[in-house]
Image: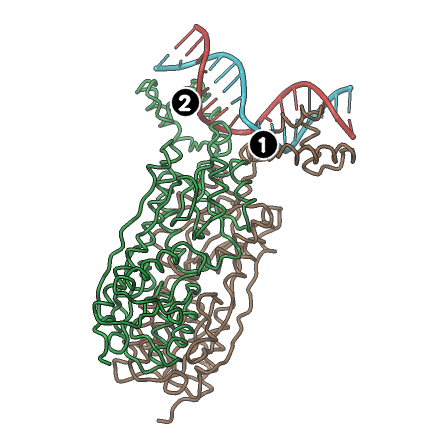
Chain colours: A green, B brown, C cyan, D red
Amino acid sequence: MANLKDLAEHLGLSQATVSRALNGYSTVNAETRRKVQEAARLLNYRPNTSARRLATGRAGAFGLVLEQSDNLLNDPHFVDFLSGFTQELAAQDLDVVLTSAEGLATYRRYASTSKVDGFVISAPKVKDARVAALTEMAFPFVVHGQTEADAPYAFYDIANERAFLDATRLLLNLGHRRIALINGPADTMFARQRLDGFHKALAEKGLPPDPRLIHHATMSEDEGYALTRQLFAGSEAPTAILCSSTLQTLGLTRRLREEGLEMGRDVSVISHDDGLSSMKTENFSVPLTVTRAPIREAGQEIARMLVALGNGASVETQQKTAPVELIVRASTSAAPQE
Amino acid sequence: MANLKDLAEHLGLSQATVSRALNGYSTVNAETRRKVQEAARLLNYRPNTSARRLATGRAGAFGLVLEQSDNLLNDPHFVDFLSGFTQELAAQDLDVVLTSAEGLATYRRYASTSKVDGFVISAPKVKDARVAALTEMAFPFVVHGQTEADAPYAFYDIANERAFLDATRLLLNLGHRRIALINGPADTMFARQRLDGFHKALAEKGLPPDPRLIHHATMSEDEGYALTRQLFAGSEAPTAILCSSTLQTLGLTRRLREEGLEMGRDVSVISHDDGLSSMKTENFSVPLTVTRAPIREAGQEIARMLVALGNGASVETQQKTAPVELIVRASTSAAPQE
DNA sequence: TTGTAAGCGTTATCAT
DNA sequence: ATGATAACGCTTACAA
């Protein structure tokens, strides 16, 4: 409960000197610093956060707003992201402040009220209003993913298009022609990117996309199940399926079993794998062929970018597209002969 | 970007009056207040958070620390909790600050540095050190669950013991005698409570617990799978299984299929269901019999409790054990004849 | 190398 | 009902 004043008095020094000693200013005598540090430890001194923030004008925290209507944030992948993000910031004594809201007003308020020094934008839409607003306010932010914007902005993305291009090519090379895509929500950029990769691969073989085989859905077990059921209901069932998340794939697996179909023999499956600790694709009954990019690392890297931005780094230097691994396991095989 | 001073000058009033007008003090002239509010809106005035915090001594935020070693927080159930917690606080203009740490030091630092006005303690251990420390510091907190403590403390728990007592009774009444339990981590209180309920029900029938049928695990799909495999590997396979989370049950389901066993016919299953939006137990291939308690509500209620505590409510008034529903669906049936 | 003192933007205590 | 003015606890010019 000791404050700076107490500590200074105790030491017979000015508050300024004590503050400098503690904050690592070079102009302070080594011996003085030692004494100050010792006394600080002894008196259990902790600088008051609000006071420091008021004086420096920095919040020492980065914000993340949970969009209420956005079911993406109700999804399990988000915990892993958050875990990486928080851990990286905590290592530098920075906090993450979470709030829940609808629309842009909250971003404005948190920025102008200096509650946070920057935002991370999760699950960006193809054309994301938050990015436009924050850019206009000249307030720091990093997008987890990408969006269509007029000005450059900081982002961390994974090579979604390339990943799904490669995955689709793999299936095509195995002889598959009727390939289904269970994608993320239609308005998200990552779903768009994956769809693009998918289309590109088909185009390379001169194959037209079949809309009946392309579906957008939330990242839930249910949807994976329901869509797989639907895919096999008609006469033109796919021989291979691309799936956007492990959770969807779990539902897919469930349905496949009910259809009496064996994954990796009757139907080939490639899933995107965010590297969640609670669902390991290598341990699936049929080990899954996946496009893999640990989402936890996204959290960590975005934290670093936000810090860099805060230290004056330009937006152009904070743009990264991480590669996605294609890991071939047992869920893919040659297309069945007609 | 206008601050209080600007606003006061603009209005020809003192900062004090403006502040009072804006903060709803009764002693201010109605007409004055109107003018002040209008000007505030016009100049887009937002009180600076740090300044306000420094002046009031309140952080306007509640903390949640992610224990790095705790795999419970890497689990999907946590998002739903967080979502409810955050939303409820946001409605009252309060933030949640997240940090990542190991051990008690962080709690001490965040408390003494007035970064937060209170904590939520997630995934409490049977005897939780955090609860003891915070109690000793007389710093506000609410436990999500319960723990063994020397002094009263605020908590929100669900009736875990009762739920698993009822669930086990149901299975026993259906004639099951070899009932397995796939529980949460052994050091968590909720796992202990569920085990107690399980034991109690067995004891009512004079049945001794069989250690080979009782397992503790993390809340992952993998573990559910691995343990189910193990359960059916020996000669003394169970006819019914109690499972602690939907995710484990997903793994269990996967393995059961591989064993050629049909849920609800060959093996009865009851799962605990946290009401996650991404995994709906009613939509399972065999709709699941569950003990159900939406974890999102826990988040909301704990937020309210924290606020109450902040407003001076006594710890004794902030203790709640929410009921758990037992919903019988198709995954349970009479035990197969020997 | 250290000290003095002026902020930072509020709220809260006294007067008036 | 309103205004001065003193906190709140720190950082940071500017002096010494």
Q: Give the camera-side residue of A261 and B53.
A: A261
The crowd level at tag 1 (other Cα within 10 Å; few <14, some 14-19, many 20+) is few
**Residue under pointer 2:** A18
Quarter residue A324 falls in:
bottom left
The kind of residue on which mark 2 rests is: Val
**Residue under pointer 1:** B55
Q: Give the camera-side residue of B300 and B159.
A: B300
Residue A188 percent across, percent down from the top left: 43, 56
Q: Give the camera-side residue of A324 and A286.
A: A324
Name the front one of labels 2 and 1: 1
Residue B135 in sight in this render? no
Q: Could you give the CA–CA distance between mark 2 and mark 1, rounded to whole angstroms?
A: 23 Å
Total number of numbered discs in the rendering: 2
Tell me which chain the residue with mark 2 is part of: A
Secondary element under disc 1, as helix, strand or loop, is helix
Query: Which residue is found at the position 40% from the left and 71% from the top?
Result: A212
Residue A274 percent across, percent down from the top left: 33, 58
Tell me which chain the residue with mark 1 is part of: B
Quarter residue B70 falls in:
bottom left
